[in-house]
Image (cartoon, grey):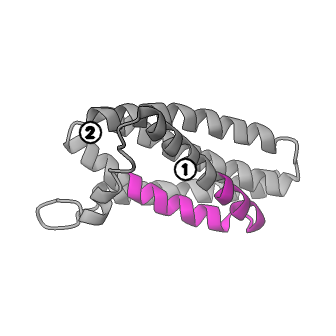
Amino acid sequence: MNRKIKIISMSQLAVVTVFFVWGILFRAESNGVLPSNVLGMLTKVQTTSDWQNFLWCFSNNLAVLFIIFWLNYWTYGILGGLWCANSAFTLGALIKFSIISKLWLSVIFMLLELSSSVFMMISSTFLKFKKDYKKTLISFLIIAIILFVAAILETIVLKLYR
């Protein structure tokens, strides 16, 4: 069983890595400008309240990963892998844009969000095959801590670029 879990996890990581690199290398137009729908994702909330921005960033990401965790769990890693690959591509493109724009703090919180997604995908698949329900709460706690730090950084970025 351990070999099966390792093969699935390594396959998931390989797919996510390919999509992340593809996102970084992606060129939407000949001049290298990202399309407007990708740029629209950068302006998540940006209300005047930092507290509201923080709550939105944290709760939105946590809720999405909670749902994807269980979808991934019940589909033996398939849906979570597809979702994580899609997220990796999008974040790769956004990270490229952030690096070009010298928004270094954005790069850090996006990498934290990506790492929480990858951790969610691997831990959910692992728990499904191991049938270890006790460690589910620990997985959620680790994901919540990573997303908490990412939400703080994202709130700072939103404040800086309001």
Which residue sits at x=11%, y=62%? 31
Q: Residue at x 76, y 51 (%)?
A: 126
Q: Which residue carries the number 2 mark?
A: 162
From what the image shows, is residue 117 above or below residue 79? above
Magenta residue span: 66-91
Q: Is residue 15 visible?
A: no
**4 drawn magenta:** no
Q: Which numbered dot is residue 33?
A: none
Depth order, front residue of 141/126: 141
Could you tell whether 10 is left or right of 130 in the image?
A: left
SS assignment for the magenta stretch, majority:
helix
The stretch drawn in magenta includes residue 72: yes
Among all residues in the image, which is located at the extreme left? 31
Secondary-structure class at tag 2: loop
Q: Position of residue 35 (x, y in %)?
A: 24, 65
Q: Residue furthest front?
A: 48
Secondary structure of the residue carrying tag 1 is helix
In primary-sequence order, the first of circles 1 and 2 is 1
The residue at the point 47 percent across, 33 percent down is: 51
Please report contact status of discs 1 and 2: CB closer than 8 Å, yes or no. no
